[in-house]
Amino acid sequence: MRPLDGIIILDLTRLLPGAVATMMLGDFGADVIKIEEPGRGDPARTAPHRSKRESPYFLATNRNKRSVVIDLKRPAGRDLFLRLAERADVVVEGFRPGVMDRLGIGYESLRRINPRLVYCAISGYGQDGPYRLRAGHDINYIGIAGVLGLNGEKDGSPVVPGVQVADLAGGSMQSVIGILLALAARERTGEGQMVDISMMDGALAMMFVPLANYLIGGVEPQRGTETLSGRYACYHVYQTQDGRHLSLGALEPKFWANACQVIGREDLIAVQFADGAKQAECIATLTAIFRTQTAAEWLAAFQDADACLMLVNTVAEAVDDHQVRHRGLIGEVRHPTEGTVKQLGPTVRLIATPGEIRLPPPRLGEHTRRVLEEIGYADEVIDQLARDGVIGLQQ
């Protein structure tokens, strides 16, 4: 028995934030029905860097889902979706505010036919406010939220993170949390509700420490000058003789003392949190010291030091890292056209009811017929809807 067995999710999202959210729910048993437009389907299918037929981007974010192709702009397509929504538990969409209403399948319309429905809307800036209709991407959301402004060196320009903070932490993760909370509330009240997810809001939620320093401490954080962003030598990144980088996280005094002992500079223990010239000198000293040996040599020296020093992995090294391999984080799925596809598996670990990869990413329209049969459509009706262009069947 999986935690979300029996939960039916209609997924109208495209690209990254919604796809990852519904995939996470599908990993734990939810029946995720991916609603795609006729023709190309989810644009992620044809994103850059395609492998054989499907994009790696799509393959990595759409396992444990069934694909149904419906033209929601046609009245018959809208009526078909409404029939699906009558028995669904969750609808997830990622359009700009107002789009679903114009299609006749917005929250108020769906709530009238299914009061128990949990409706999750993922957008850049939320369902209200002066930015609600603005287009945007991750870089814009983290820019407004202040995240981008804190990334980078003290005297340099902001640096764009290598991962999508707002899309994933602000969109995907917040959506999963919101949907699960709404489902839990439904168990008590018997009624569903709308979950309004703003990726900008979610990016701001990553700012707990900087906001605490500003709102409570009264000091506005500055790029490259905070305790956890380059201010101190004890929490820093250092280059080694062979051009690799090491992350030192010796924040607690005991870890810092251990690190200083390994490098033979016990005199630096007392200046861990010194400011000004003394801290600049400390950073410069460690920078010079770490450049005297290779990354492998330093890792060996710190092996038993208990000082929070680790290698800065490349992506390939992260996938092959001993801890990642031990935890079984990279899984495999067998796809009918792509063969064996490796991908990041479930990262939320439930000991008794773990997540699992049950279904490969679906081919476009692969499950249209089966899903319509489940809600009572006869084969001849399905065939006629396909001839009329209302639905799409797998070719």
Image (tube, helix red, strand yellow):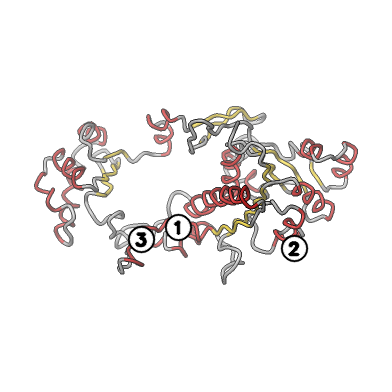
User: To which residue does mark 2 refer?
Assistant: 102
**Left or right of 86: which side holds 227?**
left
- Residue 210, numbered circle: 3
Q: Which residue has dot 1 on it?
A: 205
Amino acid residing under circle 1: Ala
Q: Is residue 262 above or below residue 215?
A: above
What is the spatial separation of the Cα atoms under label 1 and label 3, in whole angstroms? 11 Å
Q: Where is the N terminus found, in terms of image quarters?
A: top right
Residue at 33% across, 67% down? 220
Q: Which badge, 2 or 1, comes first in the chain's sequence?
A: 2
Q: Quick one: 286 or 128, which is closer to the camera?
A: 128
Percent x, y of residue 57: 57, 42
Please report contact status of discs 1 and 3: CB closer than 8 Å, yes or no: no
Left or right: 280 as drawn, with respect to 82: left
* x, y percent for residue 136: 56, 61
Residue 26 against residue 15 in the figure, above or below = above
Count all numbered tags in the image, as a single digit. Answer: 3
Relative depth, front residue between 159 and 178? 178
Question: Which mark sits nearer the N-terminus, 1 or 3?
Answer: 1
Q: Residues within 10 Å of mark 3 (few under 14, many from 20)?
A: many
Q: CA distance from mark 2 to mark 1?
A: 31 Å
Q: Residue at x 77, y 38 (%)?
A: 371
Give above or below for 256 relative to 337: below
